[in-house]
Image (cartoon, helix red, strand yellow):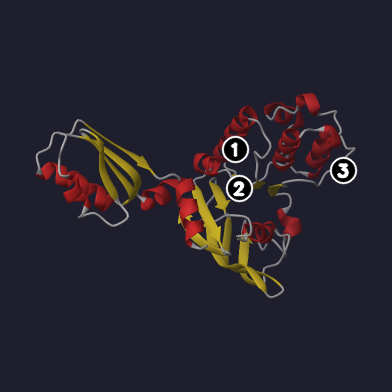
């Protein structure tokens, strides 16, 4: 399978401290990959290697078939990078910096429609220093997009944005992916990652702790809560004794049975089978599946 980005055993050290410890992952074309990790997990250092800002101490990275460190000049016209902050002179007007970046590209996006799409039209003549945090964030996204990149790096793309601007940015990322652009994003907003990402890589302690689609990761984590409405007064304690230790079973009100904990598919099947064996009448059954945030917190807490 074609890979727009592949990291193979990447190691990054700062003196005696290893911050990225053999990380490997790959990214397919026209997909959004969310690179997640707590502060200090090694995510930023790994991203710097992928963007060509530093050479790995061991391992290798391929971006669009090229080494991002050795072929950085060749990749600049094919890759868009959204910086989290900085990179713009305070007195430069927003429109001027977009026009300048567009002039460097072989096939740039028209500045005016891009600015309109990102809600920047009213601020194009404003100096960078007078823009709000959310406006600067939208400008940074426009700067990354104006060169019509094949691969887009987005670092905290909606930080500081209000709810309306955040959802507009999500829609724009969806459109960019539909146009065939690959997107690697970092975010601390786990609902954002679950909403946008086709694939997720979770970094913890400099290593890849988990990888897969949001659906795969949450399915593997199992169900967190199961509620069953059935005949009241069933001996649910008998069932509880047969379940894994971390699963609780109660009847908080007559005919309503609540199960909580790490409910793997086999555990859910056993619970349903127990009711079937008693020929109990089930009037309702619903679950709360673990979210990507639940998975992330479980992995991070486990390593503490």
Q: Give the answer, above or below, for where 46 lies relative to 159.
A: below
Query: Which of the 4 quarters of the picture holds residue 229?
Result: top left
Q: Which mark is residue 185?
A: 2
Q: CA–CA distance between discs 3 and 1?
A: 26 Å
Residue 285: x percent and y percent? 25, 35
Residue 86: x percent and y percent? 79, 46
Residue at x 53%, y 60% (from the top left corner): 25
Callouts 2 and 3 close, C-beta under 8 Å: no
Query: Which of the 4 quarters of the picture holds residue 95?
Result: top right
Residue at x 15%, y 37% (from the top left corner): 233
Residue labelled with disc 3: 89
In front: label 1 or label 2:
2
Q: Give the answer, above or below, for where 55 lies relative to 286.
A: below
- Residue 97 relative to residue 17: left or right: right
Q: Give the answer, above or below, for where 169 lies relative to 289.
A: above
- SS state under label 1: helix
Q: CA–CA distance between discs 1 and 2?
A: 10 Å
- SS state under label 3: loop
Residue 170: x percent and y percent? 58, 35
Q: CA–CA distance between discs 2 and 3?
A: 25 Å
- SS state under label 2: strand
Residue labelled with disc 1: 173
Judging depth in this view, the residue of 189 and 145 nearest the camera is 189
Q: Residue furthest top?
A: 122
Callouts 1 and 2 close, C-beta under 8 Å: yes
The answer to which of marks 3 and 1 sits earlier in the sequence is: 3
The answer to which of marks 2 and 3 sits earlier in the sequence is: 3
């Amino acid at each position: 399978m074609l890979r727009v980005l592949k990291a193979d055993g990447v190691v990054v050290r700062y003196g005696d401290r290893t911050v990225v410890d053999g990380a490997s992952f790959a990214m397919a074309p026209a997909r959004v990959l969310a690179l997640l990790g707590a502060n200090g997990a090694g995510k930023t250092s790994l991203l710097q290697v992928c963007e060509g800002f530093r050479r790995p101490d061991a391992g290798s990275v391929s971006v669009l078939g090229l080494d991002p460190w050795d072929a950085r000049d060749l990749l600049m016209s094919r890759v868009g990078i959204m910086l989290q902050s900085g990179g713009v002179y305070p007195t430069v007007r927003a429109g001027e910096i977009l026009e300048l970046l567009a002039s460097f590209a072989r096939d740039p996006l028209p500045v005016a429609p891009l600015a309109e799409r990102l809600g920047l039209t009213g601020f194009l003549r404003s100096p960078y220093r007078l823009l709000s945090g959310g406006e600067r964030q939208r400008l940074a996204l426009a700067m990354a997009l104006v060169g019509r990149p094949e691969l887009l790096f987005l670092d905290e793309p909606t930080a500081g944005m209000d709810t309306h601007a955040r959802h507009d940015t999500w829609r724009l990322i969806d459109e960019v992916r539909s146009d065939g652009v690959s997107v690697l994003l970092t975010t601390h907003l786990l609902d954002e990652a679950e909403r946008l990402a086709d694939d997720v890589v979770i970094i913890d302690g400099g290593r890849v702790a988990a990888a897969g689609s949001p659906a795969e990761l949450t399915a593997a984590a199992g169900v967190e809560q199961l509620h069953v409405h059935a005949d009241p007064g069933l001996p649910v304690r008998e069932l509880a004794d047969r379940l894994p230790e971390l699963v609780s079973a109660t009847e908080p009100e007559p005919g309503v049975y609540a199960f909580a904990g790490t409910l793997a598919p086999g555990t859910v099947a056993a619970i349903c089978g127990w009711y079937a064996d008693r020929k109990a009448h089930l009037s309702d059954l619903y679950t709360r599946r673990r979210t990507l945030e639940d998975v992330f917190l479980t992995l991070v807490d486990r390593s503490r």
